[in-house]
């Protein structure tokens, strides 16, 4: 068993000790003043034996940790006790024992330990700054909406009662660059005179402009201007570069003649502790590891990059993460009704990004594994009712946002450059359905034929999607062919998953068959995200004038309701209600698995409308904890209540530790095994117990073949009509785009290159579990 799938077989106690001693005693360091290293280790020939003995002590610590800690300080104290009491205060013994257990995967349970406010919540976070495309009336309700430019809006509360605004500022370029050296909290780093100081001035000026502009709008609205810089609280780390940043920013923020601001040191803002590795060149560090373990440097880095890897004489990124997350919650709660400026380091922002990302810790850590200079110099967070908001770059765009925007502009220009159709020029369309089938395809296809004929277009269908293009299964369509088509389940012209279409030679063959129809014509593709990627590919590579219509029961495409979703939920409801009835009658427990292609939108909708006891989805940050706390917790309280149903909806492939395939696999047996040991369900003297059956039902592909509901048929007709109308009248708006349907009846084009995965509805999830008001 290895650390989260990484092969770390090369890690041994002897290798770790040799590596740690080399770093502590022999490695050269960057020349810098104010470097406070731990005391050098004393020679100790019995360290290998003591390290192996300490491994059992650390295993016991991991086991005890499952009971949780009240906060970051308690966790840090318990970890320090292991070093002092179980390792004889020998940092190298702890280093070797801890990281050997990391290599075998035995520290992984620490990721799920409840520590103060560190556990990722199941509810959706409040939002501070949103892009234009995500601004909805629900988000804006009760807020002051201020335009920050670059299509970004700040959702400001009308007052700060029960709230704290946290401006988190990261120092810029410093004299000792963290990209080359391990810097951390033990090195008193200062801003680089040529790059760091001017950057600090620029950050201060940009923040001052934004605060000033927003303050004026608050004054105009006759609201209390809580963005008066004279009232701001300033907190720094002990590193000189954060104090320098504070001085530069405060000088710009404060009006002329105002009293000089002061900053207090705050432990939460400290960087990571690299112990004896402080000041060491990262390449030298990797080479020393490679030498100690007898592997190449790239392999050795697999150990160093683990979030639980503890540096000799220091600590791990996970330790920093715990300190930052718990500390930010504490700062938010202790500075109610205040604006706080926090001057800190890149590792702090990285920890926040990992916590605020909805994915589990390891997935988010992998995503944000690198944090470069020049990124996200000012991040705005709010703490509201004890919750931290999502991650929002307050000044300008983050590096990721900036790169995404630049790429979007470039690709969008290319899309527009490929449009050859002129208004009223189109003469024919070709339509196909691709990927997993769904209800509503027939209604959309019929509308394409009806509207197309009304506009004088020849209409053709392709049987079995992109496979049909490759095989030249293209047929002209008449009125007779589409009679009754609107009410047909699934796709009346077939569909398919055709992986060979990724091969350029197959695409070229398909294009030869399609070419005669595309002179003054367009291709319309109905399908999910994979099918729309195929549409984008032939648009970009061959210049096909293509329009997409979203169709998937998974409903996982952002900005639209997909065809088939309403019908799938309706059919699932019939099965779920039947199972609830038999559950209430027999006292049984049912787990109903639905499809979702790795997303939980369908599962959540089915569970919510049926009032299921719970829903297990891929998006949950800790499915194993959900099983323990929600599923088993609810059953302990409600099992045996007369006429009470016990039904849980599960999204397919949701990972958990009870079976490698996830979903309902292994879940039924695990829950049944727990119930069998609950004393309240044992037979009482003179009575016979009601046997509790725990069963799984997999609805699977039945939902794809659902009869189309009126909602799906109406949406399909709207999309089909608008696809034809806009191809005729405004081809520059829709070619190379997907038509998105948004309630109530709004249809907007989204460029195929901008199609994204739909965010999970944490508000609905929270409401279903009764913690939306928490």
Image (tube, rainbow, N blue to C red):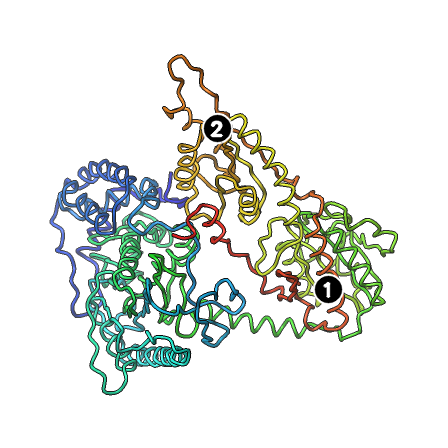
Total of numbered circles in the picture? Answer: 2
212 displayed left or right of 533: left
Disc marking residue 642: 2
| Dots 2, 1 in contact, CB < 8 A | no
User: Percent position (x, y) of residue 715?
Assistant: 69, 57
Residue designated by label 1? 723
Marks 2 and 1 sit apart, C-alpha to C-alpha, by 53 Å
429 displayed left or right of 679: right
Residue located at (80% from left, 54% from top): 472
Q: Based on the displayed image, in which of its 4 quarters is residue 670 positioned?
A: top left
User: Percent position (x, y) of residue 318?
Assistant: 30, 52
Question: Closest to the observer: 475 or 703?
Answer: 703
Question: Closest to the observer: 96 or 577?
Answer: 577
Q: Nearer the viewer, mark 2 or mark 1?
A: 2
Question: Closest to the observer: 752 or 384?
Answer: 384
Please tell me whether residue 532 is drawn above or below residue 585 in the rendered image: below
Q: Residues within 10 Å of mark 1 (few under 14, many from 20)?
A: many
**Quadrant that contains the N terminus:** top left
751 displayed left or right of 233: right
Please tell me whether residue 577 is drawn above or below residue 75 in the rendered image: above
Residue located at (47% from left, 54% from top): 763
Mark closer to the chain start, 2 or 1: 2
Please tell me whether residue 109 is drawn above or below residue 260 in the rendered image: above
Q: Secondary structure at mark 2?
A: loop
């Amino acid at each position: 068993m290895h650390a989260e799938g990484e092969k770390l077989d090369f890690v041994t106690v002897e290798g770790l000790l040799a590596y740690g001693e080399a770093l502590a005693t022999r490695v050269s360091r960057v020349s810098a003043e104010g470097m406070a290293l731990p005391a050098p280790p004393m020679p100790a020939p019995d360290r290998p034996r003591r390290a192996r003995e300490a491994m059992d002590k650390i295993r016991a610590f991991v086991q005890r940790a499952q009971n949780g800690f009240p906060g970051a300080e308690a966790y840090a104290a318990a970890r320090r006790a292991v070093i002092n009491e179980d390792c004889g205060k020998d940092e190298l013994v702890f280093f070797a024992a801890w990281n050997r257990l990391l290599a075998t995967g035995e520290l992984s349970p620490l990721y799920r330990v409840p520590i103060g406010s560190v556990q990722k919540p199941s509810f959706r976070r409040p939002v501070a700054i949103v892009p234009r495309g995500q601004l909805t009336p629900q988000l804006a309700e009760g807020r002051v909406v201020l335009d920050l430019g670059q299509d970004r809006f700040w959702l400001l509360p009308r007052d700060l009662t029960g709230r704290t605004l946290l401006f988190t500022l990261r120092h810029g370029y410093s004299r000792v660059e963290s990209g080359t050296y391990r810097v951390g909290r033990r090195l008193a780093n200062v801003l680089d005179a040529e790059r760091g100081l001017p950057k600090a001035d620029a950050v201060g000026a940009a923040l001052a402009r934004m605060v000033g502009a927003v303050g004026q709008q608050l004054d105009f609205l006759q609201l209390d201007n809580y963005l008066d810089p004279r009232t701001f609280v300033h907190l720094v780390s002990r590193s000189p570069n954060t104090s320098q940043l504070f001085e530069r920013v405060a000088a710009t923020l404060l009006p002329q003649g105002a009293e000089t601001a002061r900053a207090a040191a705050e432990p939460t803002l400290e960087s990571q502790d690299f112990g004896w590795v402080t000041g060491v060149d990262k390449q030298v560090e990797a080479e020393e590891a490679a030498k100690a373990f007898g592997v190449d440097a790239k392999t050795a880095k697999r150990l160093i990059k683990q979030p639980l890897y503890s540096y000799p004489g220091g600590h791990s990124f996970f330790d920093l993460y715990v300190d930052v997350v718990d500390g930010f919650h504490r700062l938010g709660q202790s500075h109610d009704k205040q604006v706080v400026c926090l001057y800190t380091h890149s590792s702090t922002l990285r920890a926040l990004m990992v916590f605020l990302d909805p994915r589990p810790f390891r997935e988010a850590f992998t995503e944000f594994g690198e944090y470069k200079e020049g990124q996200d110099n000012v991040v705005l967070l709010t703490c509201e009712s004890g919750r931290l908001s999502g991650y929002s770059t307050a000044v300008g765009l983050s590096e990721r946002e900036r790169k995404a925007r630049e790429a979007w502009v470039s690709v969008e220009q290319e899309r527009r450059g490929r449009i050859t159709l002129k208004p009223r020029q189109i003469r024919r369309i070709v339509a196909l359905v691709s990927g997993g089938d769904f209800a509503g395809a027939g209604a959309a296809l019929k509308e394409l034929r009806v509207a197309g004929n009304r506009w004088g277009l020849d209409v053709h269908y392709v049987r079995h999607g992109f496979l049909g293009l490759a095989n030249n299964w293209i047929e002209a369509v008449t009125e007779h062919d589409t009679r009754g088509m609107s009410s047909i389940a699934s796709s009346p012209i077939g569909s398919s998953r055709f992986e060979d279409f990724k091969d350029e030679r197959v695409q070229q063959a398909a294009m030869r068959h399609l070419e005669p129809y595309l002179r003054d014509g367009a291709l319309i593709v109905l399908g999910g995200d994979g099918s729309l990627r195929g549409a984008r590919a032939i648009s970009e590579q061959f210049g096909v004038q293509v329009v997409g219509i979203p169709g998937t029961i998974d409903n996982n495409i952002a900005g639209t309701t997909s065809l088939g979703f309403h019908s799938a939920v309706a059919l699932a409801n019939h099965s779920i209600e039947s199972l609830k009835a038999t559950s209430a009658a027999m006292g049984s427990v049912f787990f109903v698995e639905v499809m979702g292609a790795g997303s939980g939108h369908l599962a959540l909708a089915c569970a919510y409308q049926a009032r299921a006891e719970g829903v297990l989805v891929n998006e949950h940050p800790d499915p194993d904890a959900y099983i323990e706390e929600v599923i088993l917790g609810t059953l302990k309280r409600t099992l045996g209540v007369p006429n009470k149903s016990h039904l849980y909806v599960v999204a397919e492939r949701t990972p958990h530790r009870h079976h490698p395939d996830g979903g309902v696999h292994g879940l039924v047996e695990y829950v049944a095994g727990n119930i069998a040991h609950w004393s309240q369900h044992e037979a009482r003297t003179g009575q016979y117990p009601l046997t509790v059956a725990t069963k799984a039902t997999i609805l699977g592909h039945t939902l794809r073949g659902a009869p189309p509901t009126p909602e799906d048929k109406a949406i399909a007709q709207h999309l089909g009509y608008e696809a034809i109308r806009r191809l005729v009248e405004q081809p520059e708006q829709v070619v190379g785009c997907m038509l998105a349907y948004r309630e109530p009846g709004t249809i907007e084009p989204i460029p195929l290159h901008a199609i994204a995965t739909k965010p999970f509805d944490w508000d609905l999830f929270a409401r279903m579990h009764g913690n939306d008001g928490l």
